[in-house]
Amino acid sequence: MKQPIVPFFISHRGCPHKCVFCDQVKIAGAVGEFPTGTEILAKIASYRDSGRCRSVGVAFYGGTFTALSPAVQEGLLKPLQPLVASGEVGSIRVSTRPDAIDLQTVQFLREMGVKTVELGVQSMADDVLDLAGRGHTSADVARASRMLREAGLALGAQLMPGLPGDTSEKAMDSLARVIALQPDFLRIYPTLVIAGTKLADFYEIGSYRPLSIGTAVLLCKAMLHRAWKAAIPVIRMGLQPTAELETAGTVLAGPYHPAFRHLVEAELCFDLLRRMTSGMRRGSSVEIICAPSRISAVIGHKRGNVARLGQIYGLTVKNVRGDPALSPFEFSVERGGDRLHGDMIRDLEYG
Ligand code: SF4
């Protein structure tokens, strides 16, 4: 059974920087003081009770954990130690910047039972990092990633296509360079213009244009496919919808969609379906068989894939059904007695 994660948002705390796109308060919806040891333990207990599970994971999201003062880091991690020892907390995850990692920090995290460190990489193009006001370089990412991996910690990397100065080529190159660092997982967040940020000022004066939703979906489709090929899980695409983020006036512009990943996966499914059905006569009726978890992406957002197969190729989709024997990347298309087989990883190619 998957371990439930108990999240703690530390927001902008610990971060001495002000990246042009960042307003952690609006993105993570968190303000206020750090949780006390008592509050941390109470929240974990309530998750364990409600989930009826022996063991949970703990994640400190947002901010720059390892740039917090040592006393604050200890204040957050020390209360967890008895639970780590007893196995009631099975994993601890923190997020930080690449330049806030050094050997001493890595040693401290290991001693405190931290298993996973997520690095805000955002881009591997130094000019993009510079324009975003990140204050670190791609060399910092490579160095920090190596240190974390050598220490046996799991490595996560966050990427933000669509930053000022970014292009599709640079975003794909950034992904390739991050994949070469062998992260255990990725998160991909297309850049949004959040009110109150420097990026919002750039947008207002016309010096920054965000990706459109269509362009972001196409780019992220190629990125997700590349990650699939490298067998690296992408555990999130697009910011998680929160009340704060969905409040009018928070996202000023950019490719925000509450079901962004669904749009991307539906496009990948459509590309494979288009390829598989390209030789079929107009007017044919087909049944599509895929992994049960893929049914909604195969059908598409608001049944868009089924509609497009009809409108563009004249095909009627009689049924989409799940087959647990198929991997999430494989489909079969049946027409009459014929059955075609396709695989998104094997059969699709994006430059
Ligand atoms: S380093 Fe992270 S928390 Fe700090 S300003 Fe940049 S994005 Fe925000």
Image (cartoon, rainbow, N blue to C red):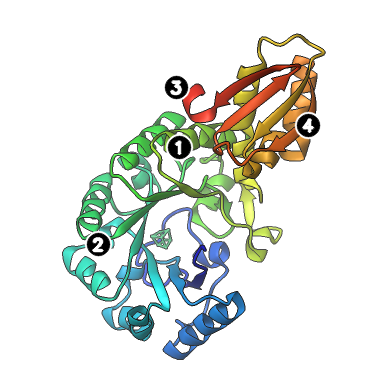
Left or right placement of residue 96 versus residue 34 in this view: left
**Tag 4: amino acid:** Asn
Q: Is residue 56 left or right of residue 341?
A: left
- Does the beta carbon at disc 3 come under 8 Å from ligand 1? no
Q: In which quarter of the image is ligand 1?
A: bottom left
Closer-to-camera residue (21/335): 335
Question: Image point 28% across, 76% down: which residue?
Answer: 112
- Let me know if residue 212 appears in the view: no
Task: For the residues labelled 3 and 1, say whether their Cβ atoms are less than 8 Å apart.
Answer: no
Looking at the image, residue 158 lies above or below residue 69: above
Q: Tell me the amino acid under the disc marked 1.
A: Trp
Of circles 2 and 3, which is in front? 3
The answer to whether 239 is drawn above or below residue 92 in the figure is above
Give SS at disc 3: loop
In the picture, residue 229 is in which quadrant?
top left
SS of the residue under disc 4: strand
* Three-letter amino acid code at the position of disc 2: Ile
Q: Mark 1 points at which residue?
A: 228
- Regarding residue 47, the answer to whether it shows in the image is yes
Check disc 3 and report the residue beneath it. Answer: 351
Mark 3–mark 4 Cα distance, whole angstroms, equals: 32 Å
- CA gap between label 2 and label 1 equals 28 Å
Local crowd size for mark 3, using a 10 Å CA cut-off: few (<14), some (14–19), many (≥20) = few
User: Splitting the image into 4 quarters, where does residue 85 fall?
Assistant: bottom left
Q: Mark 4 points at which residue?
A: 319
